[in-house]
Amino acid sequence: MLVMVIGLLVFFTAHLVPLNVDLKNGLITRFGKRGYHIAFGLMSLIGLALIVLGFHKLQLHPGKNPVLWDPPVWTRHIALALMLPAMIAFVAAFFRSHISAALKQPLLVAIKAWALAHLIANGDLASLVLFGSFLAFAVYERIIIKRRKLTGVFTGHTGPWSNDILVAVIGTALYAVILLYLHQMVIGVSPLS
């Protein structure tokens, strides 16, 4: 659990910096834009690697990860259903499309849907800490963005309809690959079992 919690702290610390404009600008002034982006990227990757490693280990050693409740089977069906729009929203964060414009902050929508899906389908402590943290952070970041009236990268720029088709196709393909292969390989648990 400790490895995952350290990973969460590193990851969220890196992601809190851009929300503090003065701190971000001070770091850019001191280290340059490139240095800031390199440090942000490294902290994010290190945090993410520790999160995945820690969570994976906890899935392999259930004795170290107490089950707090046993979710009913139907929650897993809801989780599987939520993950498809989550993957489409994730992909929409990288393309100018009507989908990304409608969602305003597609990456935050994807994170919230992903975290909620996993919270309702898992009753172990590690899942509660991991997905609860991501859900809380995404909600917090959305509130900060809304208060500052910041807009998403593609707000107001919808792009051609072909991008929407591309977002839907890539998002669906990503969903299928994660469902059938990656989730088992990276986390050690098949969502279909």
Image (cartoon, rainbow, N blue to C red):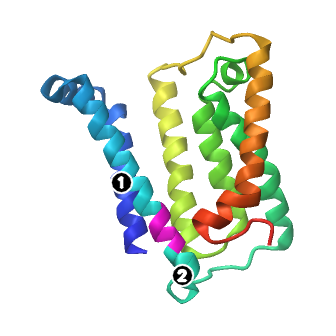
Find residue 133 and report its horizontal and vertical position in percent.
Answer: 50, 56
* Left or right of residue 168: residue 65: left
Q: Quadrant of the C terminus?
A: bottom right
Judged from the image, the secondary structure of the residue bearing numbered disc 2 is loop
- Is disc 1 placed on a helix, strand or loop? helix
Residue at horizontal 49%, vertical 42%? 140
| 115 within the magenta span | no
Estimate how packed mark 2 is, as few (under 14), some (14 to 19) or many (20 or more) residues with alpha carbons within 10 Å: some
Q: Where 21 falls versus 128 (above or below)?
A: above
Residue sitting at 21 percent across and 25 percent down?
28
Distance between the Cα atoms at labels 2 and 1?
23 Å
Q: Is residue 140 above or below residue 177?
A: above
Is 25 situated left or right of 192 in this image?
left
- Residue at which label 2 appears: 65
Amino acid of disc 2: Asn
Amino acid type shown at disc 1: Ile
- What residue is shown at x 78% (from left), y 50% (from top)? 176
Q: Nearer the viewer, residue 97 or 144?
A: 97
Residue 83 shows up from this direction: no
The foreground one among 165 and 69 is 165
Q: Residue furthest left?
A: 30
- The picture places residue 145, in percent across and down from the top left corner, at 48, 28
Q: Which residues are magenta?
A: 52-56
Residue 31 place in picture, x, y as percent: 16, 29
Label disc, if present, on residue 46 of the rendered structure: 1
- Residue drawn at point x = 55 percent, y = 42 percent: 139
Q: Is residue 181 visible?
A: yes
Point out the tag, 2 or 1, that comes first from the N-terminus: 1
Looking at the rendered image, the disc whose residue lies closer to the viewer, 2 or 1, is 1
